[in-house]
Image: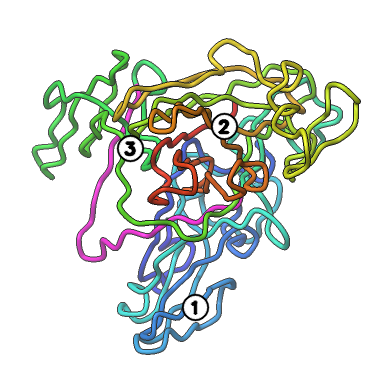
Amino acid sequence: MAGDLYGDQAQFRLRIYTSAGFSPDGIASLLPTEFERYFQLQAEDITGRTVILTQTGVDYEIPGFGLVQVLGLADLAGVQDSYDLTYIEDHDNYYDIILKGDEAAVRQIKRVALPSEGDYSAVYNPGGPGNDPENGPPGPFTVPSSPQVIEVTDTIGQPTKVSYVEVDGPVLRNPFSGTPIGQEVGLAVKDLATGHEIYQYTDPDGNVFYASFAAADDQATDLTTAIADPTAIDLIDARGFTAGSSVTVSGSYSREAFFDGSMGFYRLLDDNGAVLDPLTGGVINPGQVGYQEAALADSNRLQATGSTLTAEDLETRAFSLNILGGELYAPFLTVNDSLSGINQTYFAFGSANPDGISHSTNLGPNVIGFEDFLGGGDLDFDDIIVRFTLT
């Protein structure tokens, strides 16, 4: 508990929820002293400038609001005189970042960052690969985290409780928000002392889950703000898995578009989008002559069951397909342009597209938005949205 670790200094906690807990290598524990190894906090001052909190024990001034200090991590395990590899935390699905300072300054913390690269370590869900993966059993294990930034919800003075249980396995989620999709069945549990209520839901595939928050409906998300500067997407990257092992790619896919279309996937040689030319055995990069044909050749295009994704307008669907560990894939979108009568295919690399501009953007960790209109259309990138995980 925060009080055990930090005594009366512990004034505020910032709770981070995870899917299954964090670990430095899938086996070992996070230590209360390791905030600086994994996390950053991003606050905003009175002018809107971002102030980044990277260290514990430092008073950070948030101009216009006061001071705030990060004390460390909590809700792991008991307090100890020192922390090493013998420390075993509870590996539950949340961690607390403990803070002290002026309440106004603490309220200005807007985002938690998990950089996962450079001077920062990645985290794993519990399950391996451990600290000596070369001498371990064959995978697949969990994979390292990718860089991500999560918005903070301010509930100071308004304590909240969240309950969520999937009964029949993973449920369909809105691909943009990640919120579970379901039809309410009714009240399942009510805590008469606190008033906390948990409802039963059923997703479109009949999977039962329980939640204390409102589930999403199955309507595709309509984004109303144009994205002028699309960013590089997260590729379907199985290079962290044992080569040749079976890796499941699963998630949800929505369409908010007039044009019919389908999404597929093709194998890459590197992060820059290079593909193998099936005719010459050479390498072709996005923007070079013959790229589209090579990318969509049978030898590069993923042919696995379930690897072509489609949906009706405003519909959200679940998907699951398998690739091999060690491989790297990118999505492509083929659109039936009923106005021009010409089908268009858009790739994840702008220079490979018929109009030479980006038709995809990153909407969050492993969340991709596509724009399906030649020339960019309204640039909302919600015509197709796909969210995926690898296991």
Residue stretch in magenta: 147-166
Number of the front mark, 2 or 3: 2
For the residue marked with disc 2, what is the amino acid?
Thr
Find out whether the residues at labels 2 and 3 contact each other: C-beta distance under 8 Å.
Answer: no
For the residue marked with disc 1, what is the amino acid?
Val
Q: Residue at x 41, y 75 (%)?
A: 100
Spatial CA span between label 2 and label 1: 42 Å
**Is residue 56 depicted above or below 228 in this figure?**
below
**Outermost residue toward the bottom in this view:** 64
Which residue, given by chain and number where applicable, does mark 1 sit on? 51
Classify 10 Å Cα crowding around label 2: few (below 14), some (14-19), many (20 and above): many
Choose between 22 and 249: the one closer to the eye: 249
Spatial CA span between label 1 and label 3: 29 Å
Which residue, given by chain and number where applicable, does mark 2 sit on? 345
**Is residue 99 depicted above or below 322 in this figure?**
below
337 left or right of 345? left
**Outermost residue toward the front in this view:** 340
Q: Residue at x 51, y 32 (%)?
A: 388
Mark 3: secondary structure: loop
Number of the front mark, 2 or 1: 2
Choose between 24 and 362: the one closer to the eye: 362
Residue 257: percent from left, percent from top: 35, 34
- Residue 179, which numbered label? 3
Residue 295: percent from left, percent from top: 71, 28
Q: Give the dominant element type of the magenta stretch: helix, strand or loop.
A: loop
